[in-house]
Image (cartoon, rainbow, N blue to C red):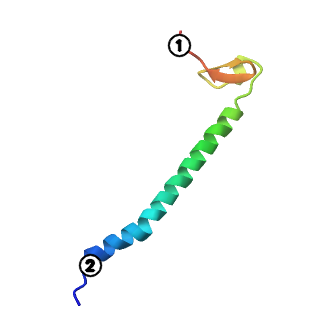
Amino acid sequence: MDVNIPVIFLGLFFYLVLPVLIGLGIILIYFQVTRKKTEQASLTCSINTDCPSGYVCAGGICVPQTAG
């Protein structure tokens, strides 16, 4: 019986490791999108000093300051 070891490892990679990496990538993207939405929702303000640097208060929401 001739067993080709590299083929076995390649099979393990595609059937075990690759799905795990894809799953971790999906989870990472989910958390980044969730964090971005949370940050945007928390940018409420009443005056410009309530906003982080580079943002101005417009209509009760911090929006990016446009150049010029």
Q: Residues within 10 Å of mark 2 (few under 14, many from 20)?
A: few
Numbered label tally: 2
Query: Which of the 4 image quarters holds residue 6?
Result: bottom left
Residue shown at 64% from the left, 26% from the top: 52
Residue shown at 35% from the left, 72% from the top: 11
- Residues at marks 2 and 1, CA–CA distance in whole angstroms: 60 Å
Say which mark, if any, is on residue 5: 2
Residue shown at 75% from the left, 24% from the top: 45
Residue closest to the far right: 46
Q: Relative to 67, does residue 7 appear above or below in the rendering?
A: below
Q: Nearer the viewer, mark 2 or mark 1?
A: 2
* In the displayed structure image, the side of residue 45 where residue 64 appears, left or right: left
Query: Which of the 4 image quarters holds residue 35?
Result: top right
Q: Quadrant of the N terminus?
A: bottom left
Amino acid type, residue under disc 2 in the picture: Ile
- Dot 2 falls on a residue whose secondary structure is helix
Residue 48, image x and y in percent? 70, 18
Residue 65, image x and y in percent? 59, 17
- Dot 1 falls on a residue whose secondary structure is loop
* In the displayed structure image, the side of residue 2 where residue 28 appears, left or right: right
Q: Relative to 31, does residue 16 appear above or below in the rendering?
A: below
**In the foreground, 39 or 23:** 23
Q: Which residue is mark 1?
A: 67
Residue closest to the far bottom: 1
Residue shown at 70% from the left, 20% from the top: 49
